[in-house]
Image (cartoon, grey):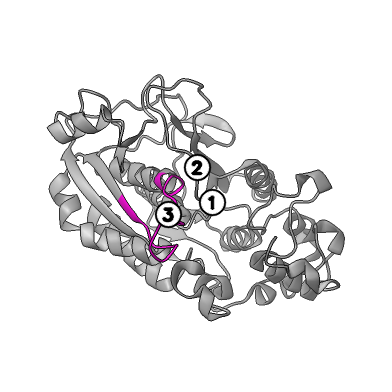
Amino acid sequence: MRIVRFVGRKQCRDSEYQRAINSAEDVVIDWVSSNANAAVAFRLNEKAMAPDLKGTLLDFADIGVLIYLADEMVIRAEATDYWTRVVRCLVPVGDPAKWRENESLLSNTLEMLSGDLWQFDWMPLKGSRPVPHHQQRLPRGFDTVCLFSGGTDSLLGAIQLLREGRKVILVGHQSEGQVASAQKDLARNLQSLFPGNTCFVQCRVSRSTREVPEFNLAPKVERSHRPRSFLFLTLGIGIAVRSGITDVFMPENGLMALNIPLQKSRTGSLSTRTAHPSYMTNFVELAQRITGFTGHVRNPFLTQSKTDMLRGLHPALRSLVLRSISCARPSRFNDRGVRHCGYCVPCIHRRIALMEAGIDSAGHYAFDVFKNLSSLDANK
């Protein structure tokens, strides 16, 4: 099975591409046609917008989308080691030679992130593929992009940048409902606290809700989303380049960025590497080679724990921090009226940090692992 980026029936005349989009063996991901099986949509301050990505920059962002959706459709349980998959992608792009030249760097970057072997066939894209048009465009006059997940770290990172006097574009990826709502809520509050100095660009990448799309997607069989930060960063770089910005920030506390395995079974990509320095270095080099990005991607909290970050939290920010989401699966216990499970590693880090700030409440979590160790049962 190959994963195919659909760019239209006439935009790529390569015979292999034409065979693939008419093959029952390959999976075609289509977010450009009128009968698409996937959706990619941008909003600026909660109103539809077009980021106006073109050429190689559009290819770069689209490959992030392709990888994010492809990851969900290739099962790990069938791999020899029950983890490492071989993912083959057929990708029409405007400059195949450039992508072939940098394929090793791309594959190595993704392997470091997801633990998989990524293989690519590059096809020539003729002309430009269809893109949606909206009146809203990216705003001018901003000097910083901050990736904005809706979590505590990205919230504190954004606040720090705004306090420094920067004009910040917050870039969020809408992965699911609870996180999307938290991002919008926090962004609105930051816009009130720092009027005129921040705006919020949110991107939604998802399967289409159409009952009968032109191409059927394979079932969603993988939920670890190890390559998610590749998509997040490609979106951030796209917004930065189109806005003439060279400073991109990805705030993540140092413990989670390094994510040192707690036991042998969590070595390699079995522990997430969302903001690992080695991965970030590779990604920035790839972005510079492919898109011409001339800036840097920085993690301002690499040498701090979440507890360090929340120590001495200003009282005025406490309610805002409590509205952030740290949980790996925030919608899992909606029926209990909470957004945090309480037993995943991010939840445990969050609680320890909030204890230091004096604002921890066990009632915000489905399970209180500090009172009931059985809540850490591996079956959850």
Q: Which residue corresponds to the image point at 69% horizontal and 75% vertical from the top-left?
A: 307
Question: Which quadrant of the rendered structure holds the C terminus?
Answer: bottom right
Q: Is residue 238 above or below residue 364?
A: above
**Amino acid type, label 3:** Leu
SS for tag 1? loop
Quadrant of the rendered image containing residue 56 = top left
Asked if marks 3 and 2 touch (Cβ < 8 Å), the reply is no
Kindly indicate the quadrant of the structure image that contains residue 178: top right
User: Residue at position x 65%, y 68% from top?
Assistant: 345
Q: In this view, does 32 lie above or below 261?
A: above
- Please state the extent of the stretch shown in magenta in the rendering: 70-87
Alpha carbon distance from label 1 to label 2:
8 Å
Q: How far apart are marks 1 and 3 (CA)?
A: 19 Å
Q: Circles 1 and 2: CB distance less than 8 Å?
A: yes
Q: Mark 3 points at which residue?
A: 233
User: Which kind of residue does numbered mark 1 sit on?
Assistant: Arg
Give left or right: position of 355 versus 72.
right
Magenta region, main secondary structure: loop
Q: Report the residue at 78% width, 61% height from top.
A: 318
Residue hosting label 1: 223
Q: Is residue 198 left or right of residue 74?
A: right
Which quadrant holds the N terminus? top left
Q: Is mark 2 on a helix, strand or loop?
A: loop
Q: Which of 291 and 204 is in front in this view?
A: 204
Q: Which tag, 1 or 3, sits closer to the chain's start?
A: 1
Q: As rendered, which of 281 and 155 lies closer to the eye?
A: 281
Three-letter amino acid code of the residue under disc 2: Lys
Residue 305 % position (x, y): 62, 76
Disc 3 element = helix
Mark 1 vs mark 3: in front: 1
- The reply to whether the magenta stretch includes residue 332 is no
Residue receiving disc 2: 220
